[in-house]
Amino acid sequence: MHKTEAPAETLIIDDDEPPSGRLAIDTLYPAPPAGIDPIHLTRPVFILPAQKTSLPRHPKLSPETRAFQKQFFPGATVRDWHDWQWQVRHRIHTYERLNQILPLGPDEFLADHTVQLPLSITPYYASLIPKDVPDHPLRRCVLPTAGEWIKMPCESDDPLGEDHQSPVPGLVHRYPDRVLFLLTDFCSTYCRYCTRSRVVGHGGIRASRARWEKAITYIAANTSVRDVLLSGGDPLTLSDDRLEWVLSRLRNIPHVQIIRIGTKVPAVLPQRITPALVKMLKKYHPLWMSLHFTHPDECTPETLTACALLADAGIPLGSQTVLLKGINDCVETMTDLMHRLMALRVRPYYLYQCDPITGSGHFRTSITQGLEIIRGMRGFTTGYAVPTYVVDAPGGGGKIPLMPDYVSGHTSDDLVLTNYENRSFTYPDPGLESLQTVPAAE
Ligand code: SF4
């Protein structure tokens, strides 16, 4: 169903950014070097210079963002633009509005509003998408296409079997010592490949205290649960007060050792990471975060500011990335993304094979391609920069790590290994008769 667009406001652009404390990032918007594919490397790597101890509260808007804001949100002030609630209120969630901002191609027109997952894009994220690049990776991540109608035999709405491992609504208990607690089904921006497209944006797992109470009661009663992952939808779209209510209740359960939050907010709504939010979050340590990133172009000065606030609050940051055809499925793009994440102080964590959800065939690559990407990274760059490639086993089998095979054989005394340069080495290891396989690293 098409929803009503929020009313446009009057044109007022005020330059109210801090006049001082500018970083090098303010001037880092050069054209890509000659010969570099502009789709895959359009932005510089943003790094907080060592001599700076803090960032200005808001980075200066890029010329592209400023032009976008003036054209499509002429009533907004710069202060509005930096306000996460303004971003959410003005998210693009009708096809009419989307077509004004990013004129739709034939395939996108066909998708219209009948696809399963609703449409929503924050103005900030839309501003990162050049309107004249039809196959731009960020565009493909968030604009519906007719491909979402095509259901392949291997696909299902709930390929991970979460609904069968859910003892109370919105809580998945698959592994022995940890649970997945879905706080809300709302996201400010919906990813077209979302594993939970069957529930997000549909109102099935609303943010309600009555439902949360049931989940917390379950966690409190199950003393084996030492780790709670808050996800959704996006938990950081909740207000500080509501999020704190959940965190404080969980922190009062003695056997809950760590709390994790899974979010895409730093990529699609970095304005949400406010000093007030991190001040609240740091009261509930040990608190970890898994940040969802897909492409190097998501690593902007705004994201740098958001991640710096989180990291400075002592929150360990890890990344999650879904391997997506035509978006990040080559060594260069994946390596670039991981390098940028490390510069944001986000440790690359998981690279997911795209789950076979209904209508995702146009996003999936082969497993072989995923393994080749890992092979193209391991040894060629910092070990920290290489994520663990996993398949979430259909049917609820959990995450299974995959690694290229570096064992090329063995003798009775030696293990024969192939290094990243495809050179062979032997490692003395008597007793190899029993060696059949080498387990992949956790
Ligand atoms: S942010 Fe996460 S939950 Fe929300 S649409 Fe994207 S993948 Fe799905």
Image (tube, rainbow, N blue to C red):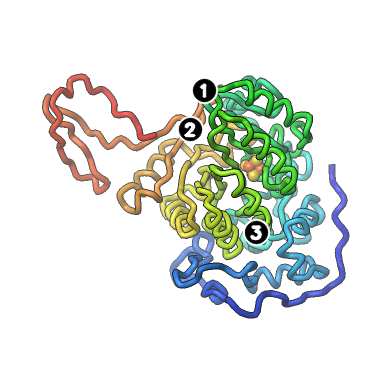
Q: Do the residues under discs 2 and 3 have CB atoms within 8 angstroms? A: no
- Relative to 212, say whether 64 is above or below: below
For residue 7, which numbered disc appears in the image? none
Viewer-nearest of discs 1 and 3 = 3
Which amino acid type corresponds to the residue marked 1 in the rendered image? Pro
Q: Which residue carries the number 1 mark?
A: 176
For residue 391, which numbered disc appears in the image? 2
> Is residue 60 shown to the viewer in this render?
yes
Question: Between marks 1 and 2, how big is the CA–CA gap?
Answer: 19 Å
The N terminus sits in image quarter = top right
Left/right of residue 381 with respect to residue 53 in the rendered view: left
Q: Do the residues under discs 1 and 3 have CB atoms within 8 angstroms? A: no
Q: Ligand 1: does it lie within 8 Å of the C-beta at label 1?
A: no
Quarter of the image for residue 36 reads: bottom left
Which amino acid type corresponds to the residue marked 2 in the rendered image? Val
Q: Position of residue 100 (x, y in %)?
A: 78, 60
Which amino acid type corresponds to the residue marked 3 in the rendered image? Pro
Q: Position of residue 205 (x, y in %)?
A: 74, 32
Give the total of numbered labels. 3
Task: Return the residue nearer the eye: 326 or 53.
Answer: 53
First in sequence, mark 2 or 3: give its number.
3
- Relative to 267, say whether 350 is above or below: above
- Relative to 351, say whether 16 is above or below: below
The C terminus sits in image quarter = top left
Q: Secondary structure at mark 2?
A: strand
Q: Do the residues under discs 1 and 2 have CB atoms within 8 angstroms? A: no
Q: Position of residue 37 (x, y in %)?
A: 48, 63
Question: Between marks 1 and 3, how big is the CA–CA gap?
Answer: 35 Å
